Image (cartoon, rainbow, N blue to C red):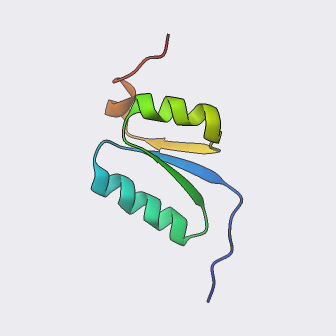
Amino acid sequence: MLKKKIDMNIMVVDDHKILRESLGEYLRINGYHVTYASSAREAYHLYQTKSPDLIAMNTVNTMAFRPS
C-alpha cells in the first residue's frame, strides 16, 4: 500500500546523526517532507529558505546558537 504524501515540511535538527536520520526516515515513510540540520546554526539558515511547518529539535541544541 502506498502512503499518501502530506504537504507538510518538518525540519529535524539534532547533532547526533543516527537520531536525526532515524526520526527523519520515520517521518518520510509516513508521507512528510523532511529537511535535516545538524546544528541550530544550520537550522536557522535553512529556516530562511525552506520555511518548515514544524521544527523537531532537542533543547540542548537550542542553546548552541542565538541569532543576533
The residue at the far right in this view is: 7
Q: Left or right: 42 with respect to 64? A: right
Say above or below: 49 vs 16: above
Residue shown at the point (37%, 35%) measured from the top left: 39
Say above or below: 45 vs 2: above
Residue 46 position in % (x across, y down):
54, 36
Residue shown at the point (54%, 55%) measured from the top left: 34
Residue 62 position in % (x across, y down):
39, 28
The residue at the far top in this view is: 68
> Where, by quadrant of the figure, is residue 32 drawn?
bottom right
Say above or below: 4 vs 18: below
The residue at the far bottom in this view is: 1
Residue 23 position in % (x across, y down):
41, 59
Residue shown at the point (63%, 36%) measured from the top left: 49
Q: Left or right: 46 with respect to 66? A: right
Q: Left or right: 51 with respect to 40? A: right
Figure disc tally: 0
> Where, by quadrant of the figure, is residue 18 drawn?
bottom left
Residue 37 position in % (x across, y down):
43, 42
Of the 4 image quadrants, the one containing the N terminus is bottom right
Q: Nearer the viewer, residue 43 or 62?
A: 43
Say above or below: 6 vs 2: above
Q: Nearer the viewer, residue 37 or 23?
A: 37
Q: Nearer the viewer, residue 26 or 36?
A: 36
> Where, by quadrant of the figure, is residue 52 drawn?
top right
